[in-house]
Amino acid sequence: MTWVNAVVQGVLLGGYYALLACGLALMFGVMRIINLAHGDIAVLGAYLITVVLDHWNVNAFIALVPVLPVMLIAGYGLQRTMLDRALRSGVLVPLLATFGLSIVIQNLLLEKFSPDVRSLGGNAGGLVTASWQISNQLSISALGALILGVAVAILGGLQLFLSRTQAGRRMRATAQDPDTAELVGIDSRGVYARATAIAVATACIAGLFLAMRSTFDPFSGPTQLIFAFEAVVIGGFGSLWGTLVGGIVLGVAQTIGAQIDPQYSVLAGHLVFLAVLASPHGGIFRVRPAT
Amino acid sequence: MTLLALEGIEARHGLLPAVRGVSLDVAEGEVLALVGANGAGKTTLLRMIAGAHRPSAGRVRFGGADITSVRAHDRVRMGIALVPEGRRLFPSLTVEENLHVAARPGRWTVDTVLDAFPLLRPLRNRRAANLSGGEQQATAIGRALMTNPRLLLLDEVSLGLAPVAVESVYRSLETLIAEGVTMLLVEQDLTRATSVARRVVCMLEGRLVLEGTGQELTREQIMDAYFGLHRARRAT
């Protein structure tokens, strides 16, 4: 039964990883940018929520409402001002630019908020401690289930957006061939800016859940980035449902590792990631790169 | 009335000049064939008109307005559509999605395009990557039509196609011409080019070297200009 519990907890943890990873997968899928600041953007989102909570005594979910549009606009601006220029200069420059952005965000957060460890667990009402007791050894936390549900809803919503709407079709067309997309009347830079806006907003939601389920400080971003990156790679770069599966595989690997020995938790995740990287298939839902 | 006017266009690929001092007028409703050997600058000229390639000198006017610095996607909105060399469909999108992404209000819709290219109707849910060359070309032309262009630029639409597929592509082009679409087409096959277009323009090493109607020009004249034979003769 302890193993069943490990798997169940792993699936719930995987929901968080998938939520964190979906923005990373979207930016890579559309623009071939690996956003090294993705984890820091999530942490930035969490800090902005604490700013709202400092002024108004509301639930953390309510505090997300004003922060989300700010992050959408910030993502749009980030693409228009910085990443567009970086993209024009070659493949390596966006990587370096986001690496620099990551350092800038960390140090600005340190400057503004001090290195103290924070948590939003206390601002989420009873949700953080609530759980359903299935049996003696198996309980499902309400927060974990909520995170998994939100992850599935966001990934599913994005998938529907990409496959059913005109803006989504245009995003896919631009991802495959931005030059030809321009020739059929698609403003590829506008599409890029919208994709980054969505990615930054989903990172902000992931940041809220990070802050609720554990603690964070100005330097929490890189660790989150590694988990998100591993989820994306395990799921096969650029596929949204693959990202969900990748997140869950990573989560289950970590909880099963922890079941063997608490020290093996993170290591087990890394090992699965390396095994997938080394396998000839490379990713569970590997999509063929557009030609 | 002049729809498209090129004035002293220069375009280069890095240091290599591909188009040198080209001036050309295309009237509304005209069908113009652009011929020339490989590397003469035809594709660059077409991509420059569509906005995908920036000229290093010269002006482009469309419907009277200077569009030299207008970006490609805005030119599509103004009514310029290019069917690029090699089709360049979005491979993982279906035929219908390839048409949909280009849609702008006008008489061409998914339905009217499928009427014009009946061979696509049974394939509408198939991915573009899994189409034959002729089917891809029909989709590429249909996609350009979906933008409801005033000027249609066609780059080597018969390249790499089976003769029967070329036949069907040209049959649909003739329907478009009958409807009065302005067309500028690059074609390697001279007989095809002169059969469709009233006026023929020949490019050699980036310059316009010959211009005339299909009736005026003899095949020999065009061939001379095509390969630069007249210069060789003059030299001897």
Image (tube, helix red, strand yellow):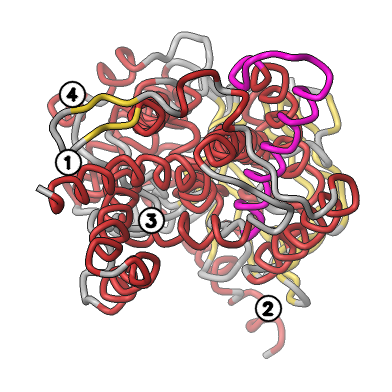
| Residue type pointed to by label 1 | Gln
Q: Earlier in the sequence, mark 4 or mark 2?
A: 4
Front position among marks 4 and 3: 3
Front position among marks 1 and 2: 1
List the residue tagged with mark 3.
A231
Q: Quadrant of residue B182?
A: top right
On residue A262, which mark appears?
A: none
Q: Which residues are magenta?
A: A36-62
| Residue type pointed to by label 2 | Arg
Please say if A123 is above or below B212: above
Q: SS for tag 3?
A: helix
Please say if A103 is above or below B9: below
| Residue type pointed to by label 4 | Arg
Q: SS for tag 4?
A: helix
Chain under label 2? Answer: B
Q: SS for tag 2?
A: helix
Seen from the viewer's position, the closer of residues B156 and A106 is A106
On residue B231, which mark appears?
A: 2
Q: Residue at x 84, y 45 (%)?
A: A113
Front position among marks 2 and 3: 3
Residue B168 placement (x, y as % from top left): 23, 36
Front position among marks 4 and 1: 1
Instruction: State the CA–CA distance, disc 4 to disc 2.
Output: 50 Å
Instruction: Give neighbour class at mark 2: few <14, some 14-19, many 20+ (Cα, 10 Å).
Output: few
Instruction: Give neighbour class at mark 4: few <14, some 14-19, many 20+ (Cα, 10 Å).
Output: some
The question of residue A53 being in magenta is answered with yes
- The answer to whether mark 2 and mark 3 are in CB contact below 8 A is no
Seen from the viewer's position, the closer of residues B83 and B208 is B83
- Residue A65 visible to the viewer: yes
Q: Residue at x 86, y 44 (%)?
A: B59
On the same chain, marks 4 and 2? The answer is: yes
